[in-house]
Amino acid sequence: MSPEGPEDVGREPPDMAPDAFRDAAHRTAEWVARYRETIEKLPVLSRAEPGEIAALLPVAPPEEGEPFDALVDDLDRVVVPGLTNWCHPGFFAYFPSSSAPPAILAELVAAALNQNAILWRTSPVATELETRMADWLRQLVGLPPDFRGVIQDTASQSSFTALLAAREAAGVDARVRGLTGRDDLPPLRLYISDHGHSSLEKAAIAAGLGQRGVRRIAADRSYRMHPDALERALLEDERAGIRPVMVGATIGTTSTASVDPAGPIAELCEAHGVWLHVDAAYAGPAAMLPEQRPRFSGWERADSIVLNPHKWLATPVDCSLLLFRDPDPFRASLALTPEYLTSDDEAEVNLHDYGLSMGRRFRALKLWFLIRWHGAEGLRALLRRHIAWAEAFAGWIREDPRFTLAAPPSFSTVCFRALGPGQRRPAPDAPGAFDPEAGGEEADALTRRIMERVNREGRVFLSHTALGGRTVLRLAVGSYLTREEHVRGAYEALDRAWEALVGS
Ligand SMILES: *Cc1c(COP(=O)(O)O)cnc(C)c1O
């Protein structure tokens, strides 16, 4: 006699039969292919007004399921109008982030496999492939084999994890004792330059150092951290009983892509026993190019390094590589395995020990597809072209008296300003050729109006920053679909905007 089942479990939940799945997958793939093919016809920046997309969405979820075709149709009706098209070839704002076809397809596979790489045994392949992909990237950027890596979602998470490790390495024992109700704990400090990324400041907030625990070190005229200023700060703080926990050096700062001198900073960190973290979230991939490698000199002395394949390496968000030498402080800060996940196998690498998340996506698959399909040579070609086109753009700006370079072009990033008629700029060859203040307030206003006009036109998207309190435009080349004509198009859009606003 077999046991009886429960009386009534209601209707069958819908399931997509294999052939229906196949059709739906083809339809979706076709939609994606067409999106990529026609992306240039779309404005880079969404033209939606706030609330416009929400108004297209039913307020309540549907009670009855809908046909799959209706879902795909709504990609055009609802999704496309609300897109800021990050993969658009005219995307030059912030730092571009785009997705290459093999990596897009790997994401489909990763979703189907739905691996959760908590422990080795919860996904041997996601664990071992991630470890190998981290090592492939390490080799590609020329770092020594004593670095190992894990893949995190974002650079923010990578830097935060590194700060927690640095805090343990500095003997704080926050893991066991916490940070509250202690009278033995001196103030803790993180040092970054004026141009260090906000994610490090956020990490300091979350790690209990607080915003007051972040000491901003003055940068020189080329926006690089001043090692002398760093040394003075370390000495002053040590004398005052403050404990330095981490120095965050940036290779490729957010405003100008400037490069903090990692070698001299590493020297100071070693002398003072302070953890060195290198934030190369944007520029890191450029270390794959032998001709750019000297700009990274000294980063091999860091304790931890972050670089984002999801920024300048055509990998869909999210994918950030955290490299480090010594796993112990990472494990000391966060490794914690609940009883139900324990096992006796000593040889296992358990990736959840290296971050806050227990559940971890199968992110290595997209890197595996990306790197194998392009080959190292293909990826280097991509980066090399972006840098060459940015340099060409800087050359056009240099030749054009209506504009002026505001900072030395760096990697694939160019900072510049517009000038009004008759406004003087520094001679392109003069020592002060990069003057963010040329043209003063009047040029600020014009620069902003030009940016707004160019962005409204929709063919390219540029963003701005502030240097010396002045408004500066940025062009960062880094999108997978960008070609030289699009970079030229950015210059032509600037030319049109200047003529429309100022010209006769
Ligand atoms: C983009 C960027 C970050 C933040 O990266 P997320 O992955 O979005 O957290 C941090 N530092 C630098 C230098 C960056 O360019």
Image (tube, rainbow, N blue to C red):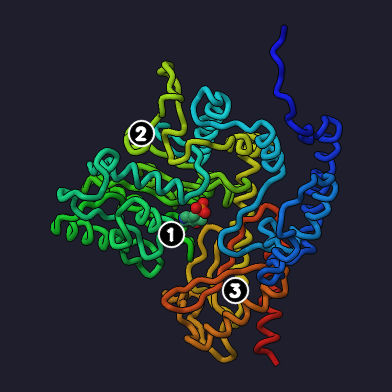
Say whether marks 1 and 3 touch (CB < 8 Å): no
- Residue 197: mark in rendering: 1
Image quadrant where residue 223 sits: bottom left
Classify 252 as above or below 29: below
**Mark 1 or 3, which is nearer the eye?**
1
Which numbered disc covers residue 331? 2
Mark 3 is surrounded, within 10 Å at the Cα level, by few (under 14), some (14 to 19) or many (20 or more) other residues, namely many
| Amino acid type, callout 3 | Ile
Measured Cα–Cα span from mark 1 to mark 3: 27 Å
> In what element is the residue under mark 1?
loop
Amino acid type shown at disc 1: His
Marks 3/2 in contact by CB < 8 Å: the verdict is no
Looking at the picture, which amino acid does disc 2 mark? Arg
Q: Where, quadrant-wise, is the N terminus in this rendering? A: top right
Q: Which residue position is annotated with label 3? A: 397
Task: Say which of 190 and 274 sits in front.
Answer: 190
Rounded to the nearest angstrom, the CA distance separating label 3 from label 2 is 49 Å
Quarter in which the C terminus is drawn:
bottom right
